[in-house]
Every structure is written in structure tokens, then in C-alpha cells.
Image (cartoon, helix red, strand yellow):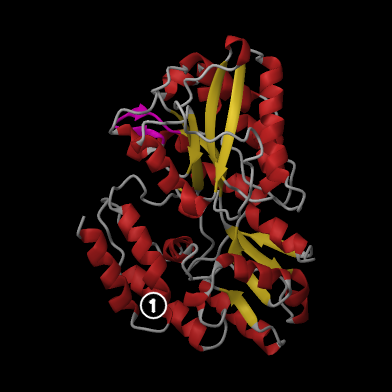
């Protein structure tokens, strides 16, 4: 979901899988214009790597192979070759494909906007039926537009909430999750007194510091931009936010050295019973449960004066390249994907969330997912449509963790300069 769901994100979302067994061919060669045996069209699909899911049974391989096998059975004239690439490498490898004129037909990754200016993508209207488009969450689909025209199709999503260890809360005499910063601090002090080494898990390392920081900023009426759309990273609200986090850290109420800790590490500590509270998403739950923690609660993230009425929304994208002329075949694949069980299997496998109204309705009975599903329609997103966001995001990941040990105004001011330089 980060880096990925940055488009971010980040649905967030962490992980590393290997799906390349689903076809075995790269997206190179003639760029997908080849014909399979019997004159059928072969679509080249390049996808990002979401990990093995909550089990270690190569669920990624099984996921994509299952999707492709089912699609090909229903569409014998179309073959699909899949290449899956790690999140750390996919942007570079796809850029090389494009530079060499070897575009895939379909690409699933964290961003689409860079391909639009070069005229490389089909418009969504050209490759997605009206019925499927109308099923998309409007707010998510809106972010797929450039100058009013949609090119990016939402693929998966995620949201954030507060997780708390019910056993540790009971041990510390805490009856319910905190709703405000003052309550959070008081609860953290009780947890520390009860022997919890990390009362609040605070991951501000490079993996997704931009997400953790954004959640805290929103809790104080701040954010990366102000209401007028101007960069406001060193706003008084944001400086106050990190001053509060600095005080928490200095009091030993957070993860030690937050600026060096990635979220996956902190989530694993939460699973091990070392952390009392932590922000996370549905993709955190397989990590918790793999670590043996099942007695946890989910609540809205506390803000300075009350729970957040919005949360961080994250989405990844799927898109279609126009070079190979496979518009009709791509359209059949997309409509199959969103109308079949494939999109549902993503949620089942990776605990990422759907981007369609029907998908959310199908999951509405899952009590653990309910807080995230409820938050999606009103989610707040990174300012990833701003061309300067890529540089700002990089700077945040590298430096914002220092604001809990250094002068918050100085650290945030340096990031603001990067934003203003665009």
C-alpha cells in the first residue's frame, strides 16, 4: 500500500511475493503483440508483489494462476502471461520496458500518472464497461483522472485504524481505547507502569513514515497541504503534533528510536505482546495472527480533541497500455476481474480492501474489517497528484523520524523547503 499505496499506498501494505510462475514470460519481446498458438491473442500483464498473504503456501502464485486459468477457460481466444515484480524494483523495470518499446498490455502498480503525459494509456472508458465503472467507489475513481479524464483504474485499497492489545489493556486497568491524545498518553503511562516496554508503537522509519506522520497531523487539523492546496508541512499544527510525539518518546511511552523503526517491525512487536497500541490497517492482521495475537481490538485513531472523522486512504492502480492494440481483449479481462471472484480473493488473501461498492457489501459482515470499510468512503489521501509529491515523500521517509529527537520546527521546515522548491 505505501510506496505502493501512494498512489500510495502504501491499501498500505506491505509485503513481498513471487507470482512469476503464472506464465513465466517477461513483458519483453515484441511488447505483447505476439499471437499464441491457434491465432489467439496473448496479453502481457505486469503486476506488483503483495506478499504471500497470511499463509506461507505461495498464495501469490495461486492467486494469479487462479485468476488467469479461470479467465482463459471462459475466453479461449485470449492468453495471459503474468510477470510479478517486487515493489522496490517495479518502477525501474517498467520504465526500462517502456524505454525499449516493450510495454505490457496491463500494468498493476502504485501510480499511473507518469504514463499519461506520453499518451501511453487507454482511457478508462475504452477498456472498462459502464457497469464496472459505476460500481467503483467514486472518490477512489476520481483520483484516476488527469485533467478530467480517467486513465487509472482503482485496484485495491486500504485504510488505517488503531489496534490495541486487550490483554495488556486489562492488565493495565484500561477499560476502553483512547479517543484523545491526552487519553492516549494516560493509557500509555498505565501500560508502562504495568510493564509494557512499548506502550505505543511509533514506526517513523523509512518504510512508511509518511503514513504514520499523516495520521498524527490529521488528528490536529494539519496535513501536508492546507485547505487552499498549498504545502504546509511546517504549519503550527504539524509542529505541535511532533512536539507531542517528541514528549511521548522522551517519556519512554513509544517504540525506542522511532525514526529507525519500520512498521512491519513494530507490527511484529505488537503481535509478540510487546506493544500496547499501534496504528495499522487490515494488512496488519495476518502479521498479528501469525505471531499468535488474536485478542486485539480495533478503534478509530485518536486525535487531539477526539477520534479522527477521516483516515488515511490508500489505493493502488491497474491500467492498460495502448501500443499493442489489444483494447477489446483487455476490456474482457478487466470486466472479468471485477465481476468474478478475483477481486474478492485479493481481500481474502492479503487483507486488502475492495475498490467497488459490491466488494465492500460482500465484506460488510466481517467485524474486524468493518472499521476500515466504514472509513473508506470518507478517506483522506496523500497529495500524490502534485508532481512534487515524489520528492517530498522521499524526504519525509528519510528525515521526519528525526523530529522526535531534534527540533520539530527545524525538521519539518527542511521538508517544507523541498516541497516549495517544486
- Is residue 164 located in the magenta-colored stretch of the structure? no
Q: In front: 225, or 334?
A: 334
**Quadrant location of the C terminus?**
bottom left
Residue 76 visible, this angle: yes
Q: Secondary structure at mark 1?
A: helix
Mark 1 neighbour class, 10 Å CA radius: few under 14, some 14 to 19, many 20 or more: many
Q: Is 113 on the left or on the right of 377, as rendered?
A: left
- Please report the residue visible at 61 percent of the width from the left and 70 percent of the height from the top: 265
Query: In the image, residue 150 lies at what x, y percent?
Result: 39, 28
Residue 356 visible, this angle: no
Q: In front: 98, or 327?
A: 98
Q: Is 264 on the left or on the right of 364, as rendered?
A: left
Residue lying at the far top in this picture: please name it: 38
Q: In front: 87, or 240?
A: 87
Start-end of magenta stretch: 144-152
Query: In the image, residue 187 lies at what x, y percent?
Result: 63, 79
Q: Which residue is mark 1?
A: 403
Amino acid at each position: 500500500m505505501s510506496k505502493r499505496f501512494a498512489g500510495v499506498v502504501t491499501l498500505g501494505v506491505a509485503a513481498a511475493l513471487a507470482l512469476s510462475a503464472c506464465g513465466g514470460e517477461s513483458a519483453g519481446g515484441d511488447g505483447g503483440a505476439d499471437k499464441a498458438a491457434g491465432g489467439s491473442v496473448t496479453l502481457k500483464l505486469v503486476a506488483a508483489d503483495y506478499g504471500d498473504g497470511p499463509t506461507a503456501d505461495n498464495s501469490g502464485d495461486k492467486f494469479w494462476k487462479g485468476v488467469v486459468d479461470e479467465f482463459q477457460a471462459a475466453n479461449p481466444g485470449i492468453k495471459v502471461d503474468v510477470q510479478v515484480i517486487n515493489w522496490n524494483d517495479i518502477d525501474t523495470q517498467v520504465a526500462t520496458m517502456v524505454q525499449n518499446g516493450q510495454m505490457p498490455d496491463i500494468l498493476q502498480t502504485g501510480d499511473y500518472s507518469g504514463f499519461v503525459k506520453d499518451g501511453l494509456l487507454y482511457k478508462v472508458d475504452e477498456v472498462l464497461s459502464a457497469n464496472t465503472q459505476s460500481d467503483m467507489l467514486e472518490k477512489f475513481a476520481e483520483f484516476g483522472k488527469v485533467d478530467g479524464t480517467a486513465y487509472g483504474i482503482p485496484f485495491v485499497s486500504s485504510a488505517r485504524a488503531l489496534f490495541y492489545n486487550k490483554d495488556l489493556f486489562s492488565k493495565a486497568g484500561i477499560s476502553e481505547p483512547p479517543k484523545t491524545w491526552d487519553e492516549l498518553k494516560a493509557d500509555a503511562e498505565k501500560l508502562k507502569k504495568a510493564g509494557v516496554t512499548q506502550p505505543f508503537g511509533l514506526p517513523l522509519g523509512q518504510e512508511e513514515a509518511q503514513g504514520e506522520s499523516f495520521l498524527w497531523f490529521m488528528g490536529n487539523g494539519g496535513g501536508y497541504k492546507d485547505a487552499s492546496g498549498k504545502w504546509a508541512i511546517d504549519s503550527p499544527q504539524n509542529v505541535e503534533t511532533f512536539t507531542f510525539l517528541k514528549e511521548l518518546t522522551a517519556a519512554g511511552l513509544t517504540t525506542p528510536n522511532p525514526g529507525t523503526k519500520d512498521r512491519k517491525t513494530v507490527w511484529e512487536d505488537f503481535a509478540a505482546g510487546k506493544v500496547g497500541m499501534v496504528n495499522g490497517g487490515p494488512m496488519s492482521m495476518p502479521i498479528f495472527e501469525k505471531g499468535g495475537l488474536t485478542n486485539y481490538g480495533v478503534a478509530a485513531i485518536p486525535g487531539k480533541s477526539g477520534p479522527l472523522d477521516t483516515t488515511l486512504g490508500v489505493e493502488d492502480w491497474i491500467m492498460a497500455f495502448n501500443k499493442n492494440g489489444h483494447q477489446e481483449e483487455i476490456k474482457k479481462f478487466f470486466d472479468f476481474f471485477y465481476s468474478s471472484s478475483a477481486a474478492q480473493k485479493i481481500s481474502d488473501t492479503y487483507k486488502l480492501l475492495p475498490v467497488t461498492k459490491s466488494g465492500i457489501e460482500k465484506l460488510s459482515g466481517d467485524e474486524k474489517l468493518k472499521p476500515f470499510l466504514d472509513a473508506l468512503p470518507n478517506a483522506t489521501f496523500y497529495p500524490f497528484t502534485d508532481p512534487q509529491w515524489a520528492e517530498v515523500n522521499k524526504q519525509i521517509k528519510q528525515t521526519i523520524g528525526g523530529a522526535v529527537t531534534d527540533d520539530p520546527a527545524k525538521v519539518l521546515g527542511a521538508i517544507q523547503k523541498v516541497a516549495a522548491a517544486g
